[in-house]
Amino acid sequence: MALLEASSITVKFGGITALDDVAISVDAGEVTGLIGPNGAGKTTFFNVLTGMQDIAAGTVVLDGSDITALNVHQRARRGVARTFQRLETFGHLNALENVLVAAEMRQRWDRTGSGPASEARRCLDRVGLLAIADRQVANLPTGTARLVELARALAIRPRLLLLDEPSSGLSEVETHALSELLRGLAGEGLAVLLVEHDMSFVMGLCSQINVFTFGKNLAVGTPSEIRANPAVQASYLGSGHGEAQ
Amino acid sequence: MNLSRGNWAAIALTVAGAVLLSALNWSGRNFSAAAVGSMLVIGLTLGSIYAVSAFGLVVVYTTTGVFNFAQGALGMYWAFLYWELRFNRGWPAPIATIAVVLVIAPIGGVVLDRLIMRRMQSTPLVLQLMSTVGLMLGIMGLAATQWRVDRGRNSQPFFGRTGGFEIFSVNVTWHRLTTICVAIALALFLRLFLHSTRSGVAMRAVVDDRSLTSLTGVNPARISGLAWALGSSLAAIAGILIAPESGMVVELLTLVVIDAFAAAAVGRLASLPLTFLGAMILGVGQQFIRSFLDFPDGFSNADRALPTILLFVVVLALPQARVRAMGAIAATSSRTRQAMRLSDAALGGMALIVTVTAWSGGLIPFVGSWTGTGINRGVTMMITAIIMLSLVPLTGWAGQVNFAPLAFAGFGAVMFLKLAGDTGQAWGLVAAALLTAPIGVLIALPAVRLKGLYLALATMAFARGFELLFFTQPGVINPDSGERIAALHFMGWQLDGRSRGFLIFLTVVFAIGVIGLIALEHSRFGRRWMAINDSEAAAAMAGINLNETKVVVFAFSAAIAGFGGALFSIQQGTLNPSQFSLLLGLPIVLLVVVGGVAYPAAALFGGVSTIAFIVIKDRLGWTWLSALEILGPGAMAVALVARPRGAVFDIGRSLSPLLPWRDVPRQPRRSGRVIDQTYEIGDLGLTTPFTEEAMIDLDRQLDIADIIRPAVAPDAAAGDS
């Protein structure tokens, strides 16, 4: 059984159906991709998984227990972490404090571990930002702030990590480092689900890729299967090289 | 609109409660057709005025996203202007009406939009609310200055006071008929305008997506100007129609139209028909209470408190807001934080204590010692500053607006009076603070699940409700009882409320409060509170329970305010319900925000400003300064749109290099200003104009050295060391 099983998710905005009976499953220890053209419902789907979006139908099951009715912070406690497509950082706080806020919550729930301060430093080090721990996040470049978000997500010690376009704003070298980091995290048993527009990044990293289009499942499979899928080519890959970033 | 089962339950409960209250307080007055008819006529007239005023709120809010707290004050001001033209200068009624409603008021609205409101649309909610509340006080101050209270004024109804016709033996004056017809006509006009004209449809579209609307060729700036012109005209109509019924008194006219908030809230600030319904319920309900109910002593304000109660009920019935990701611009457009070091806070606190002690004792040459008045003003300053401290964690860090700090303070004062008023024991201060904390929870619980604006409205309703229904209870504050609050009994000292010893005590308490808050700012509580302000979505994803966190910070804030209120009761010696009114509380909120509410030092700035206005008015004695204590805070709050970081931030940044122990001088400012906004490249040209300033900010975000663009801005190169 997969760590995350979301099934028959339907979301309606007034008369428009943003997600129509979609399903996805994410295994622990793997990086799973979610791609699709703009407006396919990827970010809406992330909102559903994290409890930020009401659904008309469907269930979200994490590690065998139904979390559909839980709200955002309860899901975080169960181990669902996420980053955002458009930055959501604590701009007034410095990089370390951003991570510390999350580490302190995990400490409060579990009362275990080495203390939130050292945990936060470890997470920040993991994304390579320990050197700028005391810089106020509002003044950081977008790509760097994105990594702060990732460190903050790691600090709640998640089981499922949802990343919404993590590579945007990063240089080629940084993107490569991010790839390595995500592979390492998956190796530790974390389930990673990422929305990406950078095709080489997705194809090189993910073991399974889900394709959404117009709020529906279009395809799911390994990178080579997805590349060869005629429906995907027609709706997405065929229309040039993805989209403008 | 779809009503959930919860909504219906809330409505049923409210109706049942209203029926029960009516039955319990039935006056036994004659319930004849004539009495009911006359109640309906007056009630519908009143409701019509609420409706017109609330329409103005809704039109401006749906179009520009700014909730205009100054709507009532605007209506009051235009009503005074109408009086000036019509009765003081003797213009004919139609000409004066047209001049005010169709010419001056719309122009005034457009000017407000151009000068103030347009700059506010991208600022944080706290600043938006403060600016419009500041505008409200500013306009009130302006009116009180222009039309001083030293003479009586009367605005006559249209078509005279006596004319009219009889229907079912009820006399309907022409003025009242006009009022009702105007409200209905305006409702129909607005409905047609917003749904069937190009400008109207554009107005409704703007609020959904400003950038998309501009792509369709509609100019959003023109649309927001139009909305403000319309809102201002509607305010004028409401003000002119109500003035003959309520009397020409600045506060009264302003507050009458504040009651329209409740009607707008019934329509969820968006629906005109529901707003109309809410207004009619309010008007008829109020008149019903006046006509047929007799409340016991202490509840005599029940009719005036009805809008407040309705607002609270509506807030309770609204559904929980979803956690939403707001995106980069909203999350990071706020100010740079300059956290004060604990050592600096301790040093500053000591300096303050030494200064106050020396000055009040006449130890500083040339400035002289403080007389009794001076000491008393110092005491007022320090107590105000302590109450203002309550807003630092709540509004400054957690971003929750609270217009009720003075109500909390009043509750604390009453608690001190009851517990330790006769002995003045110092433990009473702590007890008063602890007992006020649950009141903070009481107000926060229903409102924290909603958007920030509703919380602000709920706190305002709460402050007004406390003013009208709680402090007036004979069992709570009884000014005639001769109850006196004793001098503070602290560690063997007897500190009289107007003595130098009490002033020094307050200064020490304030300094300890500031140091404590600075320590708190660096603790996990401070971090958590700032986190929910910066990004609710990210905070929730980090596992923070938003509602619980907000309730906790509200309770903490209420406790500080309650503590300050207890000190206030010692200064005053006796309590009076009028000391804790909503209007008196607003300058307290505004001045600490002007100071820069995220910094505890802002409370001192606020306290000093409060006293400064009184001293300036007193010393200069110029008649045009007669309303300075509301005009001043109002004008300063409006100025927040230009200096959003607050005064102490700018003062601190200018002064900190002078401190000898600061070996590192201030950070070089790279182009003379800090990055105000984070840009996404894709936004440029759409939501953000492609200006050189935007490009410079963008370069800086991308860490491109300013050196490669030396020609862009001369000061960019000069400021970069």
Image: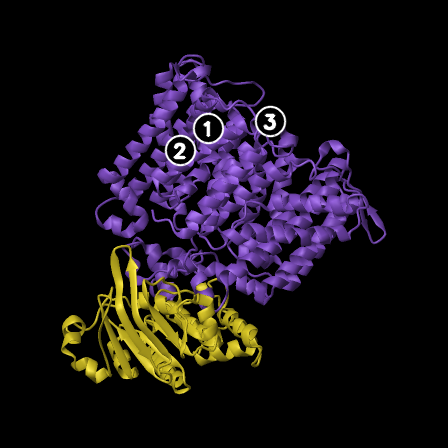
Chain colours: A yellow, B purple
Q: Residue at x 57, y 81 (%)?
A: A114
Q: Viewed as shown, does residue B212 lie left or right of B179?
A: left
**Where is residue B95 shown, x and y percent of the image?**
35, 17
* Mark 1 in CB contact with mark 2 (< 8 angstroms): no
- Whether labels 3 and 2 share one chain: yes
Q: Assess disc 3: are there few (<14), some (14-19) or many (≥20) residues with their C-alpha within 10 Å of its C-alpha.
A: few
User: Hey, which quadrant is residue B483 in on the image?
Assistant: top right
Regarding mark 3 in the picture, which secondary structure is present there? loop
Q: Which residue is mark 3?
A: B622
Question: How far apart are the alpha carbons under marks 1 and 2?
Answer: 18 Å
Amino acid under label 3?
Trp
Tag in front: 1 or 2 = 2
Rendered view: A73 above or below B306: below
**What subunit carries mark 3?**
B
Query: Residue B51 bears which disc, if any?
Result: 2
Which is more N-terminal, label 3 or label 1? Answer: 1
**Where is residue A191 shown, x and y percent of the image?**
38, 80
**What subunit carries mark 1?**
B
Rendered view: B143 above or below B568: above
Q: Nearer the viewer, residue B537 or B587?
A: B537
Q: Residue at x 39, y 14 (%)?
A: B164
Rendered view: A130 above or below B640: below
Regarding mark 1 in the picture, which secondary structure is present there? helix
* Mark 3 in CB contact with mark 2 (< 8 angstroms): no
Q: Viewed as shown, does residue A131 lie left or right of B611?
A: left
Q: Which residue is mark 1?
A: B77
Q: Viewed as shown, does residue B522 lie left or right of B162?
A: right
Question: How far apart are the alpha carbons under marks 3 and 2?
Answer: 39 Å
User: Hey, which quadrant is residue A19 in on the image?
Assistant: bottom left
Query: Can residue B597 be seen in this snapshot?
Result: no
Amino acid under label 1?
Tyr
